[in-house]
Image (cartoon, grey):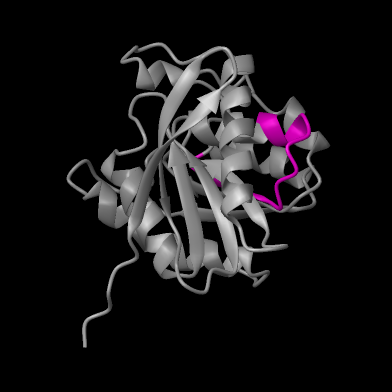
Amino acid sequence: MARVPNPEERFTIDVPEKGTVSAAYVRPRDAFASLTLFHGAGAGMDHPFMAGFARAIADEGVAALRCNFPYMEAGKRSPDREPIAVATVRAAFAAAADRADGDEPVWVGGKSFGGRMASVAVAEGVPAAGLVFLGYPLHPPGKPERVRDEHLYGIEVPMLFLQGTKDPFATLDVLHPVLARLPRATLHPVEGGGHSLGRSRSDDAREVAASFAPLVAAFMRGEQV
């Protein structure tokens, strides 16, 4: 008998001083946690990578909320300034917490820019249970000296870094020393993976993202991965 997929709820979230942004929410019947997800700089919440991961993680028992940043909602190319992005993370986290069941833990994370902004928000006080990075942009490509790491050292919750070994945004010789200073961080290297975790441009983004859902769900349960 075929499993009935979890229905997706569409709504909007108010971001202070920026209006509303689109959001989508999938909640399995027996969710053990929630995960609020944020997209990368170049594509919104409905990119196949984002939608595929949200659907797959819901199948693993994690309620998934994803939303656009205001610049993406407005059809602009340049990402929002950090205060606006952090305000969006706060608003989306609050929306996910409102939908959570009792003391259900609410995590945050995302792809590239979205994951980094989620981490800044947690460093500034968003009470997330943990962080999931689907390719963290530790430094600009070709500029390993410009490391974006200072705020990470103030984060005290578990962090999962899924990082391609060929990711130009986080070369391993720069990443490893950073993670050595983060006692609650776990690295899952994706052998041959690029910044979007795929091994080639022909890889289906939805399938690539979905393939990591069991590992992420296990980490959120407190299992070793």
Residue 203 at x, y percent in the picture:
22, 49
Q: In this view, does 149 lie to the left or right of 88?
A: right
Question: Closest to the observer: 176 or 1?
Answer: 1
- Does residue 54 lie above or below 167 as drawn? below
Residue 199 at x, y percent in the picture:
30, 48
Point 31% across, 15% down: residue: 75
Q: In this view of the protein, can residue 170 be seen by the observer?
A: no
Q: In this view, does 98 lie to the left or right of 135?
A: right
Q: Residue extending furthest left?
A: 202
- Residues in magenta? 120-135
Q: Residue extending furthest bottom?
A: 1
- Does residue 149 lie above or below 160 as drawn? above
Point 73% across, 37% down: residue: 126
Q: In this view of the protein, can residue 169 be seen by the observer?
A: yes
- Considering the image in quadrants, where does the C terminus appear? bottom right
Point 68% across, 29% down: residue: 120
- Considering the image in quadrants, where does the N terminus appear? bottom left
Is 123 a magenta residue?
Answer: yes
Residue 184 at x, y percent in the picture:
76, 53
Residue 212 at x, y percent in the picture:
42, 60
Image quarter for residue 221?
bottom right
Question: Closest to the observer: 219 or 138?
Answer: 219
Is 224 a magenta residue?
Answer: no
